[in-house]
Amino acid sequence: MSGEGRDGLVAWGAAAARRLSERLERRRERLEQRRHVAERDVHRVEQTIERAEHRNDPPPLPVPALPDAHGAPQYPALPTRPSEAVPWSLRVTAETVWRLLIVGAGLYVLFRVVQTLHIVAFAFIAALLISALLQPTVSRLQRLGMPRALAAALTFVGGLIGIGLVGWFVGWQVSTNLGEVTRRVNDSISQIHGWLNHGPFHLTDNQINQFVKQLQNAIGTNSDQITSFGFSTVGIVIEILTGVFLAAFCTFFLIYDGARIWGWLLRLFPPSARVAMAGAGPHAWSTLTAYVRGTVLVAFIDSVSIGVGIYLLGVPLALPVSVLIFLGAFVPLVGALVTGTIAVLIALVTKSVFTAAMVLVVLLAVQQIEGHLLQPLILGRAVRVHPIAVVLSVTVGSILGSIGGAIVAVPLVAVTNTTIGYLKARQRAGEDVRVALLTAQAEARAAGEAGSGAVTAGTGPGLGKGHSSGSGAGNGPGKAQGNGSETGEAPRSGS
């Protein structure tokens, strides 16, 4: 190989190395530019999140004015609006208070409507509770291949038969033991009469009879006020029959067509809230179903335990009292204890003070077992409501709606707690998704800007340099070797 050929090969290698170095430098510049763009977008996202978090912060304090031309200090001007002179904390407090007043007024109106339509309200709530108890049976029959209408009808008829059998059993037991209880009550009244005559009070028969007459007169004079809070016997019967019919009617259609009813209710919400409520509804229904089934199991255990205890103590009407305790146990923590006092009174009238005390011990023991063992194990995961909240809700419900309000209070609190918890969790998840989307958009924007920068670099001066150096490197050795060997002239850059 001649000297000129070696020189051309060396020049070509140097040009190739220079071209590779330029490509690496351009790639490094693109990566550095992409990193800067990504950092800028991430910083922009962080500023957006910080502004969203501090959106309710108080406005910044005004900057004090500079002295005027004569050196006298310029005091801040008066606010342009009266609201600017109110402290920020007072403004926040005032706005919070009037919003709470509006919510309270809405709740008051709602309570008044429910109180006016208490028959319809309690019938529908009872239908919801019964449907929550019967719905799993309908679903199980559907999974076995039975049509939904037939499954709902069989479950509904079975529930009515069960309730009818329980009512017949209670009436049969009461009618069977009523004579004995009446005789025991008369004997107890005679014992009380003798104790008043020969006891520490030493009352005469005339004084006792006069006291009884005064009591009867007081009841007679206040009969109008007493009956004003209730209804006549015919009104009570009509009200009970109406409530039972409405509850049965609503129960059947809830277990048969509950999904379509829920879909119709969803359409009443604004479009922006339908997705959230569509997710909160099944969670609330699962909580109500678990609460009703768990309460039935706890009530059954309470009634059986107390019934066995009073039966072993020889107290009459053990089975009817057990049924009453089962119904009363639907009020958590206090229902079984309150209805169990009937057994204490029956034991006191028909047996002795010691037997009544033992019945009270049985009630307190079962109540402790319910509060510390049965409620946490069976209802703990479904309800997740503190015992203080349970007692307060039962108290408020009994004040507003008597026995029905006490029964409805706890499931209402449990369902509300589940719904609010789901909506809060969904809001937090939505915020996380929003941040992730903003970050992904920032990264995509950074990648697009980096790609456009690379295209600009490839079509600009860099590509011209590479092309000229490539031409010189590709043609230099060949031209130098060919022209030098054939003509002896130096290679021309234009060829």
Image (cartoon, helix red, strand yellow):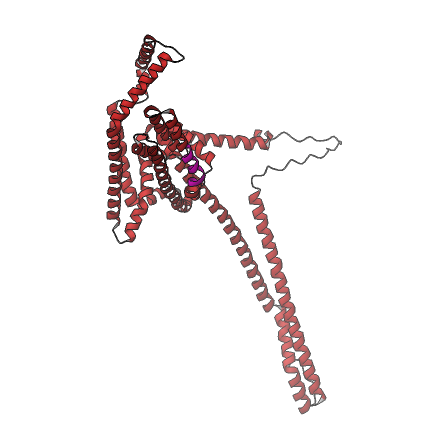
Residue 204 shows in the view:
yes
Give the residue drawn at x 61%, y 71%. 463
Please indicate whether residue 24 sits to the left or right of residue 112 in the image: right
Above or below, 209 relative to 6: above
Question: Hey, which quadrant is residue 108 in on the image?
Answer: top left
Q: Which residues are magenta?
A: 364-375
Q: Front-most of 431 and 399?
A: 399
Work out which residue is located at the far right of the displayed protein and give it. 71
Which residue lies at the image location 58% right of the left edge and 39% below the top edge? 57
Q: Is residue 231 visible?
A: no
Q: Splitting the image into 4 quarters, where does residue 125 fall? A: top left
Residue 284: image location, x then y, percent: 40, 43
Residue 369 on the magenta span: yes
Answer above or below: position of 401 versus 445. above
- Image coordinates of residue 421 in percent, x first then y, are 46, 43
Q: Main secondary structure of the magenta part?
A: helix
- Name the residue: 25% across, 25% down: 179
Q: Which residue appears at 69% of the width and 34% of the height?
A: 65
Q: 112 or 202, which is in the foreground?
A: 202
Q: Quadrant of the N terminus?
A: bottom right
Q: Nearer the viewer, residue 338 or 414?
A: 338
Q: Position of residue 473 (x, y in %)?
A: 65, 80
